[in-house]
Image (cartoon, rainbow, N blue to C red):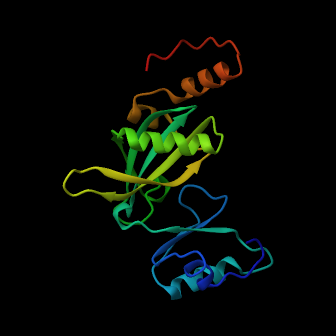
Amino acid sequence: RRGAKIEPEDILEKHNMKLPLVLKVLNTSGGRGVFLARDEKELCALLRMSQFGASHIELIAQEFLEESKGMDVRVWVIGDKAYGACKRFNETDFRSNVGQGGFPHAFELDEEGKQIAVRASMILGLDWSGVDLLLAHKDPVTGKCHWRVGEVNSSPGWDKDSDKLIDYNLGDIIVEHICHKYNIETPIPKNDK
């Protein structure tokens, strides 16, 4: 709620959330403005900080998933297809963002995870996105992963190292997708993948 004073019970009771939880400042990226409230005292301090001064900061609260601590899976989605994923690890922080010390590794995401990422991107009407999946649970017997959407980035970072990790040239695929969608001729050769 913009401009309203938020108390811990607003989040914990009214929204049926439990501690620990993650607070994210809206309109930030790279893991900046993402905080872990382990107890009510920390939550209260973070909420007070967000309300300091004349302009209130908009926050979102998110369940903290212990199995995903310091780890997420970034999925690059273009149109209605997932073009690869990488698992990001951070051994020193709960945030897995590369900008916060996370390290990306190539990762073969299961079909269900790809479908979740594509569906999240399409619901938001995005032609191109980076969907961050969090591990909600991994079955100890079957190894099957159950994913939740952590966030959907409408302007995700990527570079040539990302292309190498997932073995796609995302720049060409984005241009190809936009040109196809809007019936624009392009000199870029068709991607075989």
In the rendered structure, the answer to whether residue 165 lies left or right of residue 11 reads left
- At 55% from the left edge and 80% from the top edge, which residue is drawn? 12
In the rendered structure, the answer to whether residue 154 lies left or right of residue 151 reads right
- At 47% from the left edge and 77% from the top edge, which residue is drawn? 18
Residue 40, image x and y in percent? 51, 86
Say above or below: 154 vs 148: above
Say above or below: 64 vs 164: below
Is residue 160 or residue 147 the one in the foreground? 147
Say above or below: 190 vs 67: above
In the rendered structure, the answer to whether residue 111 lies left or right of residue 179 reads left
Q: Residue furthest right?
A: 54
Q: Residue furthest bottom?
A: 41
Residue 60, image x and y in percent? 61, 67
Displayed quadrant of residue 26: bottom right
In the rendered structure, the answer to whether residue 122 lies left or right of residue 52 reads left
- Is residue 161 in view from this perspective? no
Displayed quadrant of residue 30: bottom right
Residue 76, image x and y in percent? 50, 38
The quadrant of the picture occupied by the C terminus is top left
Is residue 100 or residue 84 the one in the foreground? 84
